[in-house]
Amino acid sequence: MKFDNFITYILLVLAFLLTASCKNLFKWTDANEIPVNAEERVQKNLEEGRGIQFGIGRNKGSGGTFDFASSNELWRASIEVLDFVSFTNASYSGGIIITDWFSGNKETSNDKDLRELKITVRFLSNEIRADGIQVVIHEKICEGKDITNCKIKKIKSNIQNEIKLAILKKATILKKETEKKNFKKRPKKKNK
């Protein structure tokens, strides 16, 4: 009998806590403030930054912030700079681009060896900064044409810095173009 009372007590406490927190879920508004037309309601909600939010209470009073690959200049610049080689992985949400193996220009000590490179770009920030991206280069050297007998190692090279610099320069250009385009679209203020 005591166990049934305990369960009842726990259920009452949970019900109280759930109903006490409902004030954060629902906001009472005046019907005159809500547009009747659905398109006007959507436009009003977009202007106010509202939308569906999971994890209620984390961003009180504001809508979510969404970064898409097409609006991130650093991502777009990386794709454009590395367009000379195919990608094995390009995950915007994961913040990484990995190229496929490709032949490097440099000859190895033995001309018969097969030498290939792979470039990995990691995004550490959405901001255009030198410490916002990391470029890593791996080298694969196979003895002769035998692709089963290969050694892979991470290398340090000037190519890393050149790729990183090219990405940062291209991202800066793309950001300036985007800002210029957005400035032209901005509505002009009317004088009263």
Image (cartoon, helix red, strand yellow):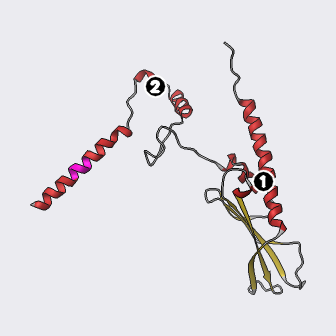
Q: Pick whichever, 106 or 36, lies toward us.
A: 106
Based on the displayed image, in which of its 4 quarters is residue 130 positioned?
bottom right
1 or 2: tag closer to the N-terminus: 2
Is 13 magenta? The answer is yes
What is the magenta range?
11-15
Where's residue 161, x and y in %? Answer: 81, 63
Looking at the image, residue 101 lies above or below residue 77: below
Give the residue number, with chain letter if any, for mark 1.
168
Q: Main secondary structure of the magenta part?
A: helix
Name the residue at 81% across, 61% down. 163
Element type at mark 1:
helix
Which label is found at residue 180? none
User: Type of residue at label 1?
Assistant: Leu
Q: Is residue 89 left or right of residue 54?
A: right
> For the N terminus, which image quadrant?
bottom left
Q: Is residue 82 visible?
A: no
Q: Report the mark closest to the observer, 1 or 2.
A: 1
Q: Is residue 84 left or right of residue 111?
A: left
Q: Spatial distance from mark 1 to mark 2, Cα to Cα?
A: 45 Å
Q: Pick whichever, 107 or 148, lies toward us.
A: 107
